[in-house]
Image (cartoon, coloured by chain):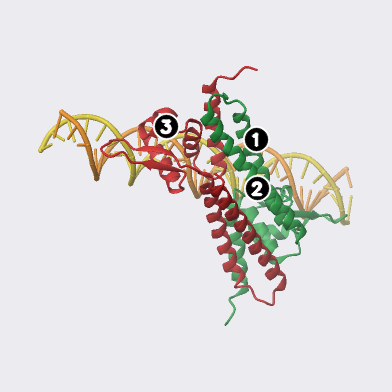
Chain colours: A green, B red, C orange, D yellow
DNA sequence: CTTGAAGTTCAGTCGATAACGAACGAATTA
DNA sequence: TAATTCGTTCGTTATCGACTGAACTTCAAG
């Protein structure tokens, strides 16, 4: 069986991660940056990223900031060096889950706020909203357990 | 401790679920419909929903279709009745997870497609993308287990 | 100190999608 | 059959956020 052109395979992969990220509420360009690092590995300068992906400095600045905030990439300092350098963190998967967990906790807090204000006499609402909060608890426990697992078995 | 006006509490809850749903990629109005059913329980006619939430028939038609597709509400037929009636399904939480699982499987399939096309000599890319696929496997297993659990312990 | 390159910030543009109004189709009632 | 009510569909509008270009800040090099 023959192999496809790896340049194409790489481009497709990067674009796919971009689209997947878009579905997850991440800017598409941030996903493409992530995809590039996943495929290539190693270290890239800010300028190389803009050139590689053919997008503006502003977009890369924004994308790298988001990815850095989420601890998916890290800025590797080079003292006495003009350019910024980046690379994937060693194990980005627990961090991906962490982002999910944070979102779940925010949502749970919102629902909780309503729950405590429901008239106890309104048993139906209390039960249904209570279930909803426990649903979030289940998800949060799951994602945290999974993150721990993924962090240990790297 | 005195209780807050329950009308306000209800409105706030409905709006909150709307915003949370929006974050999850669901139209805000669909989330508000869901919130209304969660708070109130029972059965509501199409017309009641439009009046209750003060939105157009078109939007409610779209929202109910989406929620019905996701098996979060069901249309309860009333033979010889002009209006459509809806209510929450008995246990909507496994269905919420199901939607997540479907999304994860789609994403995994995308990444898998790339994985099989990577030159085996490119060990780094193979390892990193392979990890990514296994990450999805972990998540899919988790959400499916949770859905099963939530379906049994209702 | 001046020059120039690097990266951030900000205002504006563009594209995607939610929400609406209006027209339409279906179906029950008179 | 005519009339009315109900829900969907379709074309339009409004809203939101990503992306860009350009101005600005910072800092190394000369």
Quote the CA–CA distance across marks 2 and 3: 31 Å
| Dot 3 and dot 1 residues touching (CB under 8 Å) | no
- x then y, percent, for residue B74: 41, 43
Q: Residue furthest bottom?
A: A1
Q: Earlier in the sequence, mark 1 or mark 2?
A: 2
| Residue behind mark 1 | A109
- Per the image, the residue denoted by label 3 is B55
Q: Is residue B83 left or right of residue A115?
A: left
x%, y% of residue B21? 54, 40
- x and y, in percent, of residue A62 in the image: 68, 48
Disc assigned to residue A100: 2
Residue nearest the viewer, comparing C23 with C27: C27
Q: Residue at x 28, y 35 (%)?
A: B82
Classify mark 3: residues with Cα within 10 Å, few (<14), some (14-19) or many (20+).
few
Residue A144 place in picture, x, y as percent: 70, 49
In the rendered structure, the residue with mark 3 lies on which chain? B
> Element at badge 2?
helix
């Amino acid at each position: 069986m023959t192999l496809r052109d790896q340049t194409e395979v790489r481009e497709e992969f990067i674009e796919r991660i971009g689209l997947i990220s878009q579905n997850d509420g991440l800017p598409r360009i941030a996903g493409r940056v992530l995809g590039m690092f996943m495929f290539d590995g190693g270290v890239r300068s800010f300028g190389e990223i803009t050139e590689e992906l053919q997008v503006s400095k502003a977009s890369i600045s924004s994308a790298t900031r988001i990815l850095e905030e989420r601890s998916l990439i890290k800025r590797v300092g080079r003292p006495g060096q003009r350019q910024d350098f980046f690379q994937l963190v060693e194990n980005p998967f627990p961090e991906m889950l962490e982002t999910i967990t944070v979102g779940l906790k925010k949502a749970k807090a919102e629902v909780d706020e309503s729950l405590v204000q429901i008239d106890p006499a309104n048993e139906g609402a209390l039960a249904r909203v209570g279930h909803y909060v426990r649903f979030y608890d289940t998800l949060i426990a799951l994602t945290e357990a999974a993150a721990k697992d993924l962090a240990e078995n790297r």
